[in-house]
Image: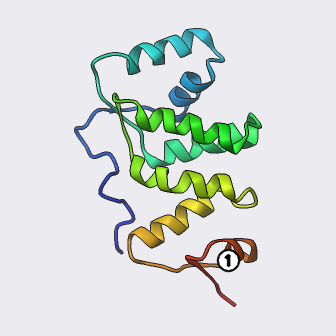
Amino acid sequence: MPSLVTSTEPQSGEGSPLDTNCLLRWLLDDIPEQSALVTALVNSEETFTVADVALIETIFVLEKLKKISRETIEKAIMAIIENDSILCNGELFIEILPIYAKHPKLSFVDCYLEAIARKTGNSPLLTLDHKLANQLSGTKLIS
């Protein structure tokens, strides 16, 4: 099976990974003690990694549970990507975030899967989802 990991996904030995809870506390500053701990970490001289799945889960929580707008989520994820202490698949997310913001009926996962298929030369993304197939050109409805 071909790898779906792009070359910019953090690799082993590049830094300790941060989980979704760390990202959420840092972005939301909703639990001051925990937010301060994460802020101190990302402001230190250390390097940290963030896996795609942690960013995707962060986006899901911000949108579905916290009811934050897609435009605000885009800015928040860009703050993570642009932080010099954090290594992540930034190039891919920079490409996906505007698509996600532009298509409110699609989930971030839909946008992510289409981008992965395109970037790995495995387009189109096959789907049974009419909504997805009608909104992103790199998809194909199977019937």
- Residue at the far bottom in the pictured view: 143
Specify the quadrant that holds the C terminus: bottom right
Residue 12 location, quadrant: top left
**At 54% across and 68% down in the image, what residue appears?**
114
**At 74% across and 43% down in the image, what residue appears?**
64
Q: Which is more toward the observer, 52 or 78?
A: 78
For label 1, the residue is 133
The location of residue 32, given as percent across then percent down, is 60, 10
Indicate whether 82 appears above or below 42: below
Indicate whether 75 appears above or below 36: below
The location of residue 34, given as percent across then percent down, is 55, 14
Density class for disc 1 (Cα within 10 Å; few <14, some 14-19, many ≥20) is some
Q: Which is more toward the observer, 130 or 69?
A: 69
Is residue 112 left or right of 71 when viewed as pictured? left
Indicate whether 31 appears above or below 124: above
Is residue 105 left or right of 116 when viewed as pictured? right
Residue 131 location, quadrant: bottom right
- Residue at the far left in the pictured view: 13
Residue 111 location, quadrant: bottom right
**At 40% across and 30% down in the image, what residue appears?**
83
**At 70% across and 61% down in the image, what residue appears?**
106
The location of residue 123, given as percent across then percent down, is 48, 79
The location of residue 89, given as percent across then percent down, is 39, 48
Specify the color scheme. rainbow
Specify the quadrant that holds the N terminus: bottom left
Is residue 41 left or right of 14 when viewed as pictured? right
Kind of residue sitting beneath label 1: Ala
Is residue 132 left or right of 48 when viewed as pictured? right
Residue at disc 1, secondary structure: helix
Disc tally is: 1
